[in-house]
Image (spheres, grey):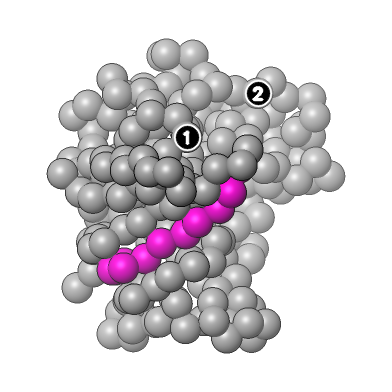
Amino acid sequence: MALLRLAGVARSWRAEGRHYTIAVDDLAIEPGQRIAVTGPSGVGKSTLIDLLALALAPDVAGDFTLTLVAERVDIAALWRRGGRGRDALALLRAGIVGYVPQAGGLLPYLSVEGNISLTQRLSGRVDGAWTITLAERLGIADLLARKPASLSVGQRQRVAIARALAHRPRLVLADEPTASVDPERAGAIMDLLVEASGTAGAALIVASHDQDRLAGRIETRLVPQVEAGPDGTCARFAPC
């Protein structure tokens, strides 16, 4: 049974006087599946990741559901419900989604260790040993007591990756996770994302321009078919 299913889902926005839309006609994300979201800049890869992370409401959603064990959750209905629905979505995100944003998104007043363990505390799954293991694997074990302001961009990105994996989520989403690290570290990061998500049986979705790092690690690709017209641009993402 699919972990996440989207059919007839779309999100639109305006930028610089142009109208943009991303659309998913039919997509089923299975537990343990590894998916790469590819395509040129500006087609909406980050917007799609935000939709899948339950952090951005769709404008149109014929079917947008999440399955937890035997329970089917109507994500589109929760977005339409407003306040209480958004509260329920926040709980779902905290419990099952691990998210690596492009900019890291660390809390400046927490230490590196505090940032990594934040997802564990929010989900009620505190595991200090796993926090240390992740930090060691990502080469940041000696930084645990430091604050984000004292870190390099690449170090902050590695902390964000550790945070996304710390609570062993069912769905791991990463938006350009290797953009700010050196090539050697990039390979290690991709291996860790694949290994950690696989060990947990989690689905992994990576938006990236780094085709070399995706090769051999990702089994399915979501590639947009871009349709440009006088009223704007629509990117339809479909698996291949």
Which residue appears at 38% of the width and 48% of the height? 234
Q: Main secondary structure of the magenta part?
A: strand
Check the image and report above or below for 138 versus 20: above
Q: Amino acid at mark 2?
A: Val
Based on the picture, tell me whether residue 88 belongs to the magenta stretch: no
Question: Which span is picked out in magenta?
Answer: 4-15
Q: Is residue 10 magenta?
A: yes
Looking at marks 1 and 2 on the same chain, the residue that comes earlier in the sequence is marked by 1
Viewer-side residue, 201 vs 203: 203
Q: Whole-Å distance between the Cαs marked 1 and 2?
A: 23 Å
Secondary structure state at the residue bearing disc 1: loop
Q: Residue at x 52, y 48 (%)?
A: 19
Q: Position of residue 125 (x, y in %)?
A: 54, 65
Disc nearest the viewer among 1 and 2: 1
84 sits to left or right of 177: right
Q: Which residue is mark 2?
A: 153
Q: Which residue is mark 1?
A: 42
User: Can you see residue 200?
Assistant: no
Tell me where residue 209 appears, x and y as whole percent.
38, 26
- Examine the rendering and report whether any part of residue 161 can be seen: yes
